[in-house]
Amino acid sequence: MKKILILICVYLPLLFLFANEKKEISIENAKIRAVPPSSLNTGGFMIIKNNSKEDIKLIKAESDISESVELHTVTMVDKTMKMRPVDSIEIKKNDSIELKPGSFHIMFIGLKAPLKKDEKKVITLFFSNGKKETLTVPVVEMNK
Amino acid sequence: MKLFSPIFFLIFFLLSTFHCKDNRPNLYLPDPPKGGSFSLQSENRKISLDELKGNIVILYFGFISCPDVCPTTLSIFANALKELNHISRSKVKFIFIDVDPERDSLERITAYTNFFHPDIIPMTGRIDEIKKVAELYGASFHKVDIKSKMGYTMDHSTNLFVINPSGKWVITLPHGTKKETILKTINDLLNE
């Protein structure tokens, strides 16, 4: 009985500690925009939260839904839309960034097959701190 | 003496403002679009703006590889079309002018616009033809090489150009214009 009590006293706090430990990186509201079958490219959007004490960068994304996956941003300059690739997307410590239309996004170039609404696709994100996150992301019709 | 000081300062103030040089920069107000008729290739034939008289026409310049503003705008416009009754909808022509004929064939552009709404009219042409239409309406587009598997992208203006049933440009709506504003613009013109 004594041994059981000791084990509980030792392991219960550890269990509690791990249960409450926040993931360094968390992803919310991830989605891929459904596009017409004739469109060979589309965008991926999400909120990336950096719960760590250091600034990090999203440096790469991978998925087998397209020939190539890149990080892009969109800016409006003099009412002209300009889309450009970026090397990375920074997320400050204890902060978050939203990949959204009109801003940073994941660019899927050369879709291998038409995307269907509600399909789930796998995306892997790679970060500058060595972490990676693999997500299962729905295809959604945006602006409906 | 007590009255002299405030009067003096009032006079001083009036004189100083009279002689004050206005250093504010001149406000630049761009010329409104000239508008005007044009003719571009659509799915099966060339369509001219003149033959669409009697309808409200809304122009938008974009391209298929755009993952952002183009599908957003077409979605919003499609949502607006769906809220019009059958009679009103028949009097509205939304034209998507594709500025990337190098990559976007009319077949693909038609499939693209049909995805959002079958009533959206696809159009494109030679670059010089599209540029002439863009100039008439104050739109712009530019091919830019980028370090990407895409090879290049098209920088382009994102406005909606509204033309009344007489064929005259009446208003330019900016990107992000809500569906409700588009509907109001359409209904106001239908009720004129």
Image (cartoon, helix red, strand yellow):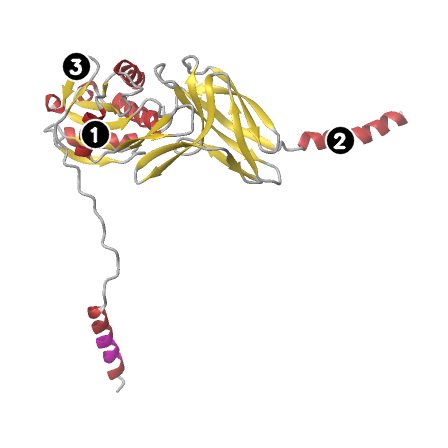
Q: CA distance from mark 3 to mark 1?
A: 19 Å
Name the secondary structure under disc 2. Answer: helix
Which chain does the numbered disc 2 sit on?
Answer: A
At x 47%, y 34%, the residue is A98
Q: Nearer the viewer, residue A26 or A54?
A: A54
Please determine whether, in this image, residue A129 is positioned above or below residue B15: above
Q: Nearer the viewer, residue B166 or B97?
A: B97
> Tag 3: Cα neighbours inside 10 Å, few (<14), some, or many (≥20)?
few
Q: What is the magenta range?
A: B6-12
Name the residue beneath numbered marker 1. Answer: B131
Q: Quadrant of the C terminus of chain B?
A: top left
Q: Nearer the viewer, mark 2 or mark 1?
A: 1
Q: Amino acid at mark 3?
A: Arg
Name the residue beneath numbered marker 3. Answer: B45
The quarter of the displayed image where residue A55 is located: top right
Mark linked to residue A14: 2
Q: Quadrant of the N terminus of chain B?
A: bottom left
